[in-house]
Amino acid sequence: MFDITKLKDVLVSYKQNFVSRQWGEEKYKWEAVRWFQDNWDVNATDFAEMLSRSLDKTFNLLASNNNFPKGMIVGFAKAAPEEVRAMFIALFDESKDVFERMDAFKTQSSVLLEKYGNGAAQHYQYENAISTYLWLRYPDKYYIYKFGEVKTVANELGSDYRFKKGAYADNIRNFLKLYDEISVALKEDIELVNLFQSQLTDTCYPDPELKTLTIDVGFYISRYYSQKDAVAQEEAEWFPATYSPGITVDEWIKLLNDSEVFTTASLEIMKRMKDYGGQATCKQLSVKYGQSSNFYNAGSSTLAKRIADKTGCPLLEVDTENSKWWPILYVGRHATKEEQGSYIWKLRDELSEALDKVELSEIELYVKAAPGEEDRGYWWLNANPKIWSFADIAVGEVQSYTLYNENGNKRRIFQNFLEAKAGDMIIGYESNPVKQIVAIGRVSAEQDGEKLFFEKIEGLTSPIDYATLRGCPELERMEYFQNPQGSLFKLTRGEYDFILDMIREENPVAQEASIDAYTKSDFLDEVYMTEKRYENLVAVLRNKKNIILQGAPGVGKTFAARRLAWSMMGEKDDSRIEFVQFHQNYSYEDFMMGYKPVEDGFELKYGIFYRFCQKAANQPDKEFFFIIDEINRGNMSKIFGELLMLIEKDYRGTKATLAYNGLSFSVPKNLYIIGMMNTADRSLAMIDYALRRRFSFFEVEPGFDSEGFIHYQNGLNNETLNELVNKVKDLNREISLDKSLGKGFCIGHSYFCGRDVCTEEWLHSIVDYDILPMLSEYWFDDANKLQRWENILQGVFQ
């Protein structure tokens, strides 16, 4: 949602400038869409030429001094037209999630850069360029995304959609929602619609849904409207400038002492506003002292009504009901950008002076705790990573903190250490150079005169940056931000809840759901492996912690890996399984952590394995499984780094210092790693020896003779299938005896699986498009053998 009145203010200015400036400079956007629509043909014979022609009118949308997405994607299309064609087909597939499509397009661009980059350092196919392609293809649905632009728009319109650096998926989804709402509002402005339509020419896309117009309004807000005189904006007059209720200080004092006018709740609002410095947003008061924002908003309006009834004071003539009342108590203004678009109230001078002269000691400053939580406190605990770290503490482990430093002097804010009680909640913060909230803890026992005891109850997979916290006006009066010197700082319940909400946005708690049980017999029913082989597989994995399932294509390695994890967990809990596929461009920065580019620099981002290890460490009593497909396609030393030691069974739980953030890290004992590799891929059969000795290798063989497959085969009841399976088993025996191949190149059973009905057409397709192409690769230098087996397999159908 956003403030519609702010958009209306924007549109007043936009319409004044539309003909004289906007249309002449920005008309090319509508022409670019029309040109693309007229020239796009995904099935074009010369795809690269078609793509280049379709993007001819995009100009600076896809090219600038330091950004060349059009040039790079056209270059890729010339080098690999079918790969790029497939990328656009997938991107324009509306049956799938939009961010997943964009992310896949970006990932594939990295692969193309490695193959065809010709020394280029970037492919430039990021959210801005990819959203442009989507907009050109579906101009009635999508918009052009720019992080800085949409964040400015959200701030200027007072939107409650948040945009954070690095939160790509949430940013894209919030961006589409916000712009959809703006688009709906534009349609209701008949003057704007008529003005726009009066300028359209035959070369322009008619934009019936006003999506491109929405893009232009966003651009206008970011480029022009938001750049109004910053000093004037900071020093904007408080509203209303000329109105006054005409109530003197003495009259305010009488009103404050009148319990029918100023109820206890009203005095609480006044005392808290005064304590905050005389001016605040409702949200700031809510976070600092408790109660909802509406308590302060509605409470102020109803108080003002009672004052008007009591005094007969003049009222401000305004269109909105609420704005008629609060000016009796306050003056107000829209907050600056740094204040996140909130509306700030300031006590009228006479009322503020009167509050200094009345007795409010009996009025509660902070909201009383709910029943059962009266004694719970909330704290911010600093860890200096040069001395100790939350990462050194396991979940559930109790740690002590001394009340006196090494010189015997009391810790700063010593009273906080005395007040902390068992059960109090702790926000765990790592100070410079980390500067992040990294854990949640709990006071386990109050101080004994020398030490305070606490336990870590959760490590954060996605820590919260100091800069993010400091940018929240609701936290500006937090004790730590007033003076950060010290170790233990008090939090109000509202501040703790506000921070916890931020934590949960990035670290959601898994929802408890009904999970189906999964046993060994379930595994053997689905994965065609003998019981003895299964028991050996489980024993090897439990012993080594790390295993690689290797075998020929079609033996069901990937299918088996997830079910192996389920069977060991005893349930189908996918929240405890992470799946990743290695490729040539996969790096330590993707896997563990690294600095990634953001709008105005670089930011340390945590990789998938780091986050999953933290997740496993938070639940030490449960087993977690990290599955790596195509493990031998990645550069093992480059990806694993110092993890080569930490993943070993004997070093599980051992801490090592990470190069990027200087914090200690360990791989939990309850985490298993399952890799898969294809032994029939001649170019990738070797694997890093340093990694090889840290994994056990388990050969996944064709399961034609397993009870599960025989039962499945009998259920299909097809003579041609039975004969074909027998021939494939004969073929596998010959492949096994071939000195240049071996059993790792056998034909897997999974080619024949997954059917309820067996048809000859299906079996033909397996032979023609799966088995024979593979044999032609195996025996490319033995045409006679290849022809003999082609005759044998085709003969099954005669």
Image (cartoon, rainbow, N blue to C red):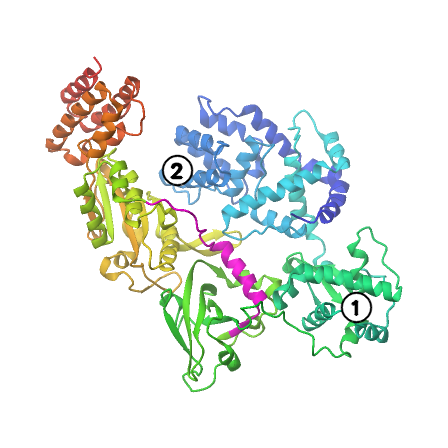
Query: Is 515 included in the stretch rendered in magenta?
Result: yes
The answer to whether residue 315 is visible is yes
Could you tell whether 137 is left or right of 518 in the image? right
Mark 2, residue position: 112
The answer to whether residue 245 is visible is no
User: In front here: 344 or 494?
Assistant: 494
Q: Which residues are magenta?
A: 489-517
Q: Secondary structure at mark 2?
A: helix
Query: Is 692 included in the stretch rendered in magenta?
Result: no
Horizontal and vertical percent for residue 56?
55, 30
Identify the mark at residue 625; answer none if there is no mark. none
Q: Amino acid at mark 2?
A: Leu
Q: How many marks?
A: 2
Q: Secondary structure at mark 1?
A: loop
Horizontal and vertical percent for residue 567?
28, 46
Horizontal and vertical percent for residue 158?
67, 52
In the image, residue 353 above or below residue 143: below
User: In front here: 458 or 736?
Assistant: 458
Mark 1, residue position: 348
Location of the C terminus by quadrant is top left
Could you tell whether 157 is left or right of 629 in the image? right
Q: Residue at x 51, y 32 (%)?
A: 94
Query: Which of the 4 image quarters holds residue 316?
Result: bottom right
